[in-house]
Amino acid sequence: MKLGRGIGVLAVAASFSCAFAFASSAGAAFPNFSDCPRSAPDIQACFDAQSTTGSLTIKGFTVPLGTSFEIRGGLVLDATSPTGNRFVPPVGKTGVFAKPVEVPGGLLGIDFPIPGNKVTATAQLAGSPSSILVDPGTLTVRVPLKLALTNPIIGPGCQIGSNSSPVTLTLIVGTTRPPLPNRPISGRPGTFDFSNPSYVAVLDNTSVDNSFSVPGASGCGIGLGLINALVNAKLRLPSAGGNNTIIVTNNIGIGGLTN
């Protein structure tokens, strides 16, 4: 890791690891249908997506993705939705589950225990759960995110992205059509597993997106926006579409109404 890039790429990596690394924040077994909203009107399936590995590249710098995130809820077929369905989160929740991730290098990008340097990053859904779109037929998932950064200096309101300007990931197992300078890349559908009669699992999918943009930071520190500028400089933000890539391997479970 280069000095000064720690909070940059790794903080955003934490968000995307949470965003579409699909890992279980609570370490639950796959698939986790424990709080599927089965009693909600018209629910036709439970949904759970968890990652196994992945990588994120922002402006040419690549970092591995961990397993700190999960998306789960219920699905309703809906012809008015762009993906032909509607996502319903568990009761009282957003459907996005993430735990804080400590950013190596902290605020200064230096891996030493300097007081006030520690930074944690937590991915959050940006906007309503209705903005999460899941297409079981094509294994496409679209989710808008914002990343909350916590540190004594940057304060509790520091975030990358917002409800009005999110980091929107659209992961597919097909071939992308990104803006330049990125070139098309391809994902890969995994293996269907019908061994459990109550749900279908699709294992070892490779999902990709290299068209998304990453907005700048907001709400960091106080005063004249100097901390916002510091965070943006560390992350090289904003980063326009065509400069960023995410590739994740994940497992998806669909069904589970009888669990």
Image (spheres, rainbow, N blue to C red):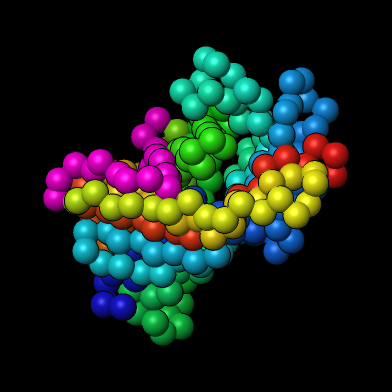
Residue 124 among those drawn in magenta: no
Provide the residue span drawn in magenta: 164-181
Q: Is residue 232 shown left or right of residue 79? A: left
**2 in relation to 243, above or below:** below
Compared to residue 33, the image places residue 121 above or below, namely: below
Where does the image place residue 85, in percent across and percent down from the top left? Answer: 58, 25
Q: State the residue in front, 83 or 117.
A: 83
Q: Which one is in front, 155 or 18?
A: 18
**Left or right, residue 83 beside residue 222:** right
Q: Residue at x 55, y 16 (%)?
A: 79
At 67% across and 42% down in the image, what residue appears? 254
Residue 25, image x, y percentages: 64, 59
Q: Residue pushed farthest left?
A: 181
Which residue in the rendered view is the most extreme toward the bottom? Answer: 112
63 sits to left or right of 72: left
**Frontmost residue, 129 versus 30:** 30
Quadrant showing the C terminus = top right
Residue ID at (53%, 45%): 124
- Residue 89 is situated, as x and y percent measured from the top left of the image, at 67, 35
Can residue 223 be seen? no
Give the residue drawn at x 74%, y 61%: 29
Task: Please state the horizontal and vertical placement of residue 191, each as a whole percent of the image.
Answer: 57, 56
- Magenta stretch holds residue 170: yes
For the stretch drawn in magenta, the main secondary structure is loop
